[in-house]
Amino acid sequence: MSVSSSPSPRRSAVRALTRHNEIGLIGLIVLVTVVAEAAVPAFRASGNDTQILDNAALVMIVAVGEALVITARQIDLSVAATLGLAAYLVGSAVGHIGFAGPVVGVAMALALGAVLGFGNGILIERIRMPAIIATLATLSIYGGLQVVVTHGSQLYSSQLPNWLGNIISTSWIGLSPLVWAAIVCVVVVGLIARFTRWGRDIYAIGSNPEAASYLGLRTGRRTYEVFAVCGALAGLAGLLYAGQYGNVDATAGSGFELTAIAAAVIGGVSLFGGSGSPLGAALGALLLTEIENILAVLKISIFAQQTLQGTAIVVAVAGYSLLSRRLNRPVRRSLRVEAGQSRPAEPSEPVSSEPTEIAEQGT
C-alpha cells in the first residue's frame, strides 16, 4: 500500500505564498495605507507620502545590506556606527574638496563603508569571533571613532556642497534622489542575489555552511565580501543621511541597526539564514517606516515605536519558525513512512538442525 505524500491544495497555496513573501507585504502595505487614510486625517496631509518615501529610503539601503548578511547566517550590528561615521567624514570631505561631485562623493562613501565592513569580516573569519560579538565590538569602536573625529562639533548643511545639501528638495519624476538611490540599490543587489553565482553562494552558505564548505564554496571569501557590501551600503546611506538631515554629530545614525534588522526580518529574511530577498527587506523597511509615520502623526512617543520594532522582530521570527515547522511536518512524516517501507525484512529465526542430526545418527 503506497502512501501519497502530495500536499493538500491549501498547504500548497500557503507554500506558494511563503515563496513569494513580497506579494503579501505589498498587500499589507496597501491595507495599512487605506486604513490610515480612512482613520487618520493627518495622514492624508499634503507631502506626507513623500516624507514617508524619503525616510524609508535610507532604511531600505541599509536593510538591503543587512539582508545579505543575515541570508549568509551572519548579522551586522555596526551598520549604524558605519552610517554615522561616513556621514560626518565623507560629508566633511566633499564639502572641503571643491571638485568633489556626486560620483566622487558616492565612491568615497562606498569605499569607507566597505573598509569598515571588511574589518568585521576579518574579526569573524580570521579571529573566529561570532558575528554578533564581533559587530557589537565594532559598533563601539566605530562609534568611538565617530566621537573622536567630530570633536564634539557638528557638520551643518551650509558646509555641504549644493548637490548634497539640496538633495531633499530636488525631485526627479516626482521622487527625490534619496528614493532613486534606494531603488537602484534594491534592483542591483536583488538581481545580483538572484541571478549570479555570488548570490547563489550566499544562499547556499546560509542554508548549510558545512555542506557549502564541503562542496568547495569559498565560504571565507564570501564572508569578507558580504560584510564589505553591507558596510558599503551603510556608507552610502551615511552620505545621503548628511544630505537629508544636514546637521551631523556624534549621535548620527544611533539605533539604525535595530531598524534595519527589523525591516529585513519583517520583509521575510530568515534569521536562521538561507532565505529572503533584498526586495522583501526594502518592502519591510517601507512598511515599518509607514507605521512609524502613523504613530508620529498620532503623537505616540518614540518609546512605543521602539517597542513596536522589538515586537515585530519577535512576531516575525516566531511566525516564520512555526510556519516552517508546520509546513515541513508532512514531509518528515512521509519520509519516515517511506523509510519504514524500504527497510529490509528481518531474517526469520533459523530452523534448528538438531532433529535432523539426531535422525541421521539413529539411522
Image (cartoon, rainbow, N blue to C red):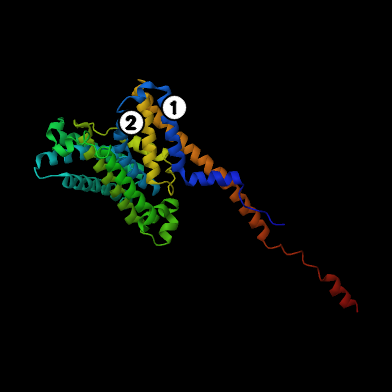
Q: Secondary structure at mark 1?
A: helix
Circle number at residue 81: none
Q: Secondary structure at mark 2?
A: helix
For badge 1, the amino acid type reads: Val
- Crowd tier of the residue under label 1, counting other residues whose Cα lies within 10 Å: few below 14, some 14–19, many 20 or above: few
What is the x, y in percent for residue 271? Answer: 42, 43
Q: Residue, x 50% and y 44% (percent of image)?
A: 17
Quadrant of residue 242 in the image? Answer: top left
What is the x, y in percent for residue 14? Answer: 54, 43
Q: Residue, x 35% and y 32% (percent of image)?
A: 289
In this figure, which residue is indicated by the disc labeled 2? 49
Please indicate whether residue 255 sits to the left or right of residue 14 in the image: left
Extreme-right residue of the structure: 363
Q: How far apart in space, not on screen, are marks 1 and 2 (Cα)?
A: 14 Å
Give the answer, above or below, for where 109 lies relative to 147: below
- Crowd tier of the residue under label 2, counting other residues whose Cα lies within 10 Å: few below 14, some 14–19, many 20 or above: some
What is the x, y in percent for residue 19? Answer: 48, 47
Pick whichever of labels 1 and 2 is earlier in the sequence: 1
Give the answer, above or below, for where 352 lies relative to 20: below
Quadrant of residue 248 in the image? Answer: top left
Is residue 130 at least partly visible in the picture?
A: no
Q: Along the line of sight, which residue is nearer the eye, 21 or 254?
A: 21
In this figure, which residue is indicated by the disc labeled 1? 35
For badge 2, the amino acid type reads: Asp
What is the x, y in percent for residue 219? Answer: 36, 56
